[in-house]
Amino acid sequence: MMNFKQWHENNEFFREMKPYFGQCDKHQRLNLSELLLATSDTAVEDYHQRGMTYNVLKDNGVAILVSRVSLRIHRHPQANHPFTVRTWEEAPAGLQLTRRYELFDQENNPLVSGSSTWVVVNLQNRRIMRPSDFTMREAPTIKSEFCGLPCGKIAAGSSMTVVDQRTIHFSDIDSNGHMSNARYGAYIMDCLPEEFQQRNIKDFRINYAHEAKEGDKLQLLADFSNPEIVHVSGVTPEGTCFESELYF
């Protein structure tokens, strides 16, 4: 039986994982929702191991929420093939914290490279804090090149049409009281035609814009006019929840 470890080395955090059968699609690829969860949970665990648990952050009046994610998928993680996630913080970009990820297999071959931005929210007034005001850890200064697409703002496709509507239920909600960022990955994949579901994703980007809460009706819109790039958006009556792009 393999023991899965997690550890800090220099200013980086490493976490060994294994994609189980139930986390993968019918092609034995790790589900997009599970990939998003693996990266975001590893970021949370990095802070947790350094003493900045969810409750400690809450007691200090702050929450840290993922804002944007960009993933370059070199090779999809496969069922029952262990991999390691390496993550580290980089210098902030404007009002957002930044974090990088590298997933690699047991032979040290790259699987996924990722970049993400996060916002620090003041729980008292629900406003975004400046990164310099988040002083619970030493501010990172490193800045490295990312091989994927910029972790920037995504514009909606030019031919968006309604393809699905989902009601946000109890099991979609995380401890912050709104829909888990990873669940959007499942919604996105579910609304794709089968021809796209069968193909391997090369790049994936998502912007989280507005919180979806339990009971909300989430309307999914998509643009399939370009066979190489698909746009998917999620909208509630309160506004756009997310914009995403999938490159094939």
Image (cartoon, rainbow, N blue to C red):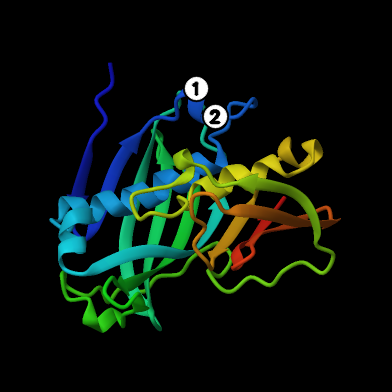
Residue 240 position in % (x across, y down)? 62, 67
Q: CA distance from mark 2 to mark 1?
A: 6 Å
Specify whether 137 is left or right of 202.
left
Residue bearing the label numbered 2: 24
Most extreme residue toward the top is 1
The residue closer to the viewer here, 209 or 177, is 177
| Picture quadrant where residue 27 is located | top right
Q: Residues within 10 Å of mark 2 (few under 14, many from 20)?
A: many
CB of mark 2 within 8 Å of CB of mark 1?
yes
Give the vertical position of 112 relative to 26 (above or below). below
Residue 99 position in % (x across, y down)? 37, 64
The residue closer to the viewer here, 63 or 145, is 63
Specify whether 237 is left or right of 2.
right
Look at 41% across and 51% down and name the residue there. Answer: 102
Residue bearing the label numbered 1: 21
The residue closer to the viewer here, 198 or 37, is 37
| Picture quadrant where residue 65 is located | bottom left
Q: Secondary structure at mark 2?
A: loop
Figure quadrant of the N terminus: top left
The residue closer to the viewer here, 106 or 39, is 39
Look at 25% across and 69% down and name the residue there. Answer: 62
Residue 9 shows up from this direction: no
Residue 120 position in % (x across, y down)? 32, 72
Per the rendering, the mark at residue 168 is none
Identity, as a three-letter code, of the amino acid under mark 1:
Phe
Residue 134 shows up from this direction: yes
Identity, as a three-letter code, of the amino acid under mark 2:
Cys
Residue 38 position in % (x across, y down)? 41, 44
Look at 79% across and 41% down and name the residue there. Answer: 193
Q: Secondary structure at mark 1?
A: helix
Specify whether 193 is left or right of 239.
right
Most extreme residue toward the left is 51
